[in-house]
Image (cartoon, helix red, strand yellow):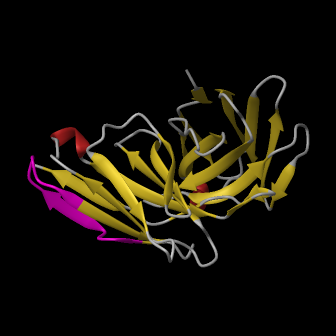
Amino acid sequence: EDKVVQSPLSLVVHEGDTVTLNCSYEVTNFRSLLWYKQEKKAPTFLFMLTSSGIEKKSGRLSSILDKKELFSILNITATQTGDSAVYLCAPYNNNDMRFGAGTRLTVKP
Amino acid sequence: ETGVTQSPTHLIKTRGQQVTLRCSSQSGHNTVSWYQQALGQGPQFIFQYYREEENGRGNFPPRFSGLQFPNYSSELNVNALELDDSALYLCASSLVTKSGYTEAFFGQGTRLTVV
């Protein structure tokens, strides 16, 4: 059975801290892994990772995939209060995304 | 703004009733997936429609059904509503071609409450 585990489940930091969110997966027919940020309702797209070892960056956010060890990490540097959200990872197989439970990040001023 | 719109935004139904939720996909996208998100959990895959045909289904009973129209918009129908169906329902659109696929963009969701 497919499994997606995100850790930690929740995290409280102060502005300026750096955080690392983890996602491990066991998914049949794996094709890629996506990261989303969910603040209120709609998850917003952050990254899609297809190849192992290639870091993707967008501003203070970066992510990398390890297809051999079956995990991905999402890094956020110099956190801001606007980064407070639930971060979801979703391995994508042939036709659907299998979401983890998410990591709830709270950034305090 | 993702260009994916869902309606209605909120809905209250009574147990045993039927409900239809709607989703307009982003322009140029041909695939719509539906997800159910219970409080405190990640979205769970219900099914996907590609070019008007069901293209994969998660672990949901047959009373969850769907449609995709020629303009690639989609409906999710749930019959015989149960209290546990109360959740946020999300649709996501993407473009799938023979050579690959794009990331999926989500609508704002429909919050369904069954009483």
Judge whether residue A22 can be spotted in this image. yes
At 35% across and 68% down in the image, what residue appears?
Answer: B22
Query: Is B25 placed above or below A83 here?
Result: below
At 21% across and 63% down in the image, what residue appears?
Answer: B11
Along the line of sight, which residue is nearer the eye, B68 or B9?
B68
Compared across the picture, whether B8 is left or right of A86 comes to left
- Range drawn in magenta: B6-19
Q: Any magenta on residue A62?
A: no
At 60% across and 67% down in the image, what residue appears?
Answer: B30
Query: Is B94 placed above or below A79 here?
Result: below
Compared across the picture, whether B77 is left or right of B115 comes to right
On the image, the x and y values in percent for residue A31 come to 74, 40
Q: Any magenta on residue B10?
A: yes
Q: Quadrant of residue A109?
A: bottom right
On the image, the x and y values in percent for residue A30 come to 72, 35
At 34% across and 43% down in the image, what residue appears?
Answer: B39
Along the line of sight, which residue is nearer the eye, B56 or A64?
B56
Compared across the picture, whether B19 is left or right of B92 comes to left
On the image, the x and y values in percent for residue B44 come to 45, 41
Along the line of sight, which residue is nearer the eye, A88 or B109?
B109
Quarter of the rendering occupied by the N terminus of chain B:
bottom right
Compared across the picture, whether A73 is left or right of B113 comes to right
State how many labels appear: 0
On the image, the x and y values in percent for residue B97 come to 73, 61
Judge whether residue A40 can be spotted in this image. no
